[in-house]
Image (spheres, grey):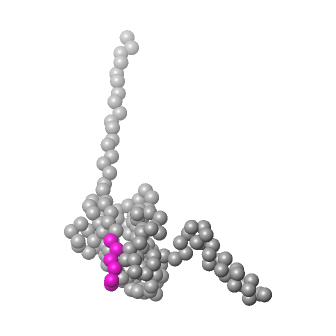
C-alpha cells in the first residue's frame, strides 16, 4: 500500500511539468541548437551547454552566463571586430555554472563577439559598443528694456 502511494506520488511529480506545459528537460539529444526553450534571443542552448549574454542596467558591463550540461571543458573567448583575442579562458568541466562580468567601459566603440566552445559546438554572441552623443544646449537669455 505504501509502495503504491509512493509510486503514485512519483508519477504525479514527474508529470506535473508536462501537464503545466513546461518542458521537463532541455533540448533533445541530436538537436545541435534548440532555442525553443530560450526566454529571449540573448539565450542559446545546445545539447552541451546554455549560453546567455546580458548588459547590466545603465553600465557598460556585459554579463556572460554558461550552464555546462554534460561536464566538458569550455573555452570562452572575447574578440573585437578584427578577430583579435581580447580575453580567453578555459572553464573547468567540473564547473556546472559559470558567470562573469566584463567591464567594457575602457573599450573602443565597435563590434565585439563572445565565442563559447566545448570543442565540438561553438556558440557566438555578438554585441556593439557605441558612445552616445549628448547634446548640451546653452540657455538662451533675452534682455528687455523696461523704460
Toward the viewer: 99 or 135?
99
Measured from the top left, where is residue 119 in percent x and y?
Answer: 33, 84
The N terminus lies in quadrant? bottom right
Residue at 34% x, 22% y is 143
Measured from the top left, where is residue 87 in percent x and y?
Answer: 31, 75
Whether residue 92 is visible to the viewer of this picture, yes or no, is yes
Toward the viewer: 104 or 66?
66
Q: In the image, 30: left or right of 22?
A: left
Residue 124 sits in quarter? bottom left
Toward the viewer: 3 or 25?
3
Magenta residues span 119-124
The C terminus lies in quadrant? top left
Measured from the top left, where is residue 54 in percent x and y?
Answer: 42, 64
Does residue 40 sit above or below 48 in this rendering?
above
Does residue 117 sit above or below 21 in this rendering?
below
Give the residue furthest to the left: 82
Residue at 38% x, 61% y is 60
Give the residue furthest to the top: 147
Q: Is residue 123 magenta?
A: yes
Does residue 84 sit above or below 4 in this rendering?
above
Residue 101 sits in quarter? bottom left
Amino acid at each position: 500500500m505504501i509502495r503504491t502511494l509512493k509510486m503514485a506520488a512519483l508519477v504525479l511529480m514527474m508529470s506535473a511539468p508536462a501537464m503545466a506545459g513546461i518542458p521537463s528537460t532541455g533540448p533533445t539529444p541530436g538537436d545541435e541548437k534548440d532555442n525553443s526553450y530560450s526566454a529571449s534571443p540573448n539565450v542559446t542552448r545546445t545539447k552541451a551547454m546554455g549560453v546567455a549574454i546580458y548588459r547590466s542596467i545603465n553600465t557598460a558591463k556585459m554579463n556572460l552566463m554558461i550552464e555546462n550540461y554534460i561536464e566538458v571543458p569550455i573555452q570562452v573567448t572575447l574578440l573585437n571586430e578584427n578577430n583579435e583575442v581580447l580575453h580567453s579562458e578555459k572553464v573547468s568541466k567540473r564547473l556546472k555554472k559559470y558567470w562573469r562580468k566584463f567591464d567594457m567601459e575602457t573599450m573602443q566603440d565597435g563590434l565585439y563577439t563572445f565565442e563559447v566552445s566545448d570543442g565540438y559546438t561553438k556558440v557566438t554572441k555578438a554585441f556593439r559598443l557605441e558612445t552616445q552623443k549628448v547634446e548640451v544646449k546653452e540657455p538662451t537669455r533675452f534682455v528687455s528694456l523696461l523704460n
